[in-house]
Amino acid sequence: MVYDLVVKDGTIVSSIGISRADIGIQDGKIAQIAPALNGREERSAEHMLVLPGGVDPHVHIQMPTAMMTTCDTWAGATRAAALGGTTTVVDFVEPNYPGQPLMQAFEERRALAQGQSAIDYAFHMTLCSSAPETLRQVPEVLEAGMPSFKVYTTYTGFHLADEELLAVLRCVAAAGGLTIVHAESDAIIQDAVARLLAEGQQSVADFPLSRPEIAEKEAIQRVLTLADYANAPVYIVHVSTRSGAEAITNARKKGQPAWGETCPQYLLLDESRIMTGQFEGAKFVCCPPLRTPDDQAALWSALQAGDLQTVGTDHCAFNFIGQKQLGKESFLNIPSGLPGIELRMTLLYTYGVKNGYLSLTDWINRCCTTPARLFGLYPHKGDIQPGFDADLVIFDPDWRGMATQSALHENVDYTPYEGFELSGRVKSTLLRGRFLVSDGEWTGAPPAGKFICGNP
């Protein structure tokens, strides 16, 4: 058979191993993996790694807050993602006002991405209430292709008390969904902030003290306990501490259905970036905060052992000039979040694979396959197998360079990884058999991303 496209002679890295073969693509799907295939178009991947397109399970694109909207757009952020080897993102639906019907909020959020996104996208549904009229809508959301529901243990307007969290955990589990949790203790944070303000400590360098390690430890332990009691599966986002990772590890050892995600910033950046005595530290303000080198080492070990299962970016881009700068008088006014959607795959290859923390298949499982499995996108996304979408990345493992804001495509005026040495880069990215990136350059393809339904 002559295929639409054949990617030839590459070293294929999938969730189960490494092989040398051609990939035949027909009608946007992977049709065959075998040597010596023929295609109407053929693209050599000799001396290259061929990867499944990355699945980033945690992004905030064009996200409105009470004060402002993040500085990227669906068009810009997803183009940057594709240039970095990510072909599917999972963003969030957040109701725009208390009591808004969940499906109405979904349609409004989806409308922002539709016709703008360069890559495919899915959504987590955010639950800010455990009211019966809200929970009655959970099955409809699942049927619409959103099997995961996010809750928070802090933040005004989002924070759920324990009894509310229990109700959500039970409801979502009964419907066949997965609850994902931003776990920081609101009581500890509120107390810490009050103490800092009373002492006049409002500088950027004081920010990490406002959300101490114990706030994450307490909340993760409590959430895991409540989920165990409710017989509900749970996924903890952006784990930043040794104690948080250990809590998830211990729960899993007991057979609890619990999963943990960390992010490149917690693996590669520490609190010294914030605590410089200069306002430039505002560039590194995110929640939870950057932690210590000891926490970094523990997170790498947990990722290596499979005790943390995914790496998402928590991409939430605010410009330093005009946005982060609003917090010059008080860290409370610094918008929280870091950009990172473009560098995830390369950073994990450089500092994970090359440093021996991750094998090539581990890398793919943490960044592609496991996120796709957990959020219902498998068996279409996240792996290289016949029948899957032909979302592929041709990756040059021999390239060497440096991360600089000027070389990236994220619509933000800095990168927290400025000056980081990089090994390997994305040479080409395909979405459903169509080249979005070729020889490291955007092809100019019009937005072709679509909403992908997740299955419970």
Image (tube, rainbow, N blue to C red):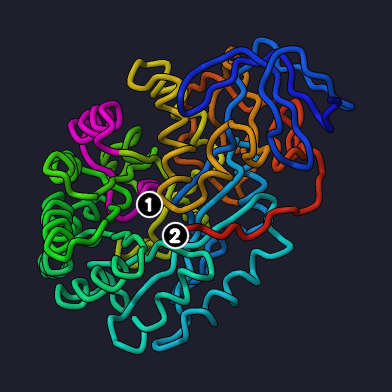
**CA–CA distance in space, label 1 to label 2:** 8 Å
94 within the magenta span: no
Up the image or down, 381 lies above or below 349; here it is below
Where residue 340 appears, x then y in whole percent?
Answer: 49, 43
Which residue has dot 1 on it?
A: 282
Q: In the image, is 220 to the left or to the right of 338?
A: left
Number of residues whose C-alpha sits closer than 10 Å to that of mark 1, classed few (under 14), some (14–19) or many (20 or more): many
Residue type, numbered disc 2: Gln
Which residue has dot 2 on it?
A: 325
From the image, which quarter does the C terminus lie in? bottom left
299 within the magenta span: yes
Helix, strand or loop for the magenta stretch, by majority:
helix
Mark 1–mark 2 contact, CB under 8 Å? yes
Q: In the image, is 442 to the left or to the right of 343?
A: right
Residue at horizontal 71%, vertical 29%?
Answer: 440
Q: Which residues are magenta?
A: 279-308
Residue type, numbered disc 1: Ala
Question: For residue 219, what is the image quadrant?
Answer: bottom left
- For mark 1, give the secondary structure: helix
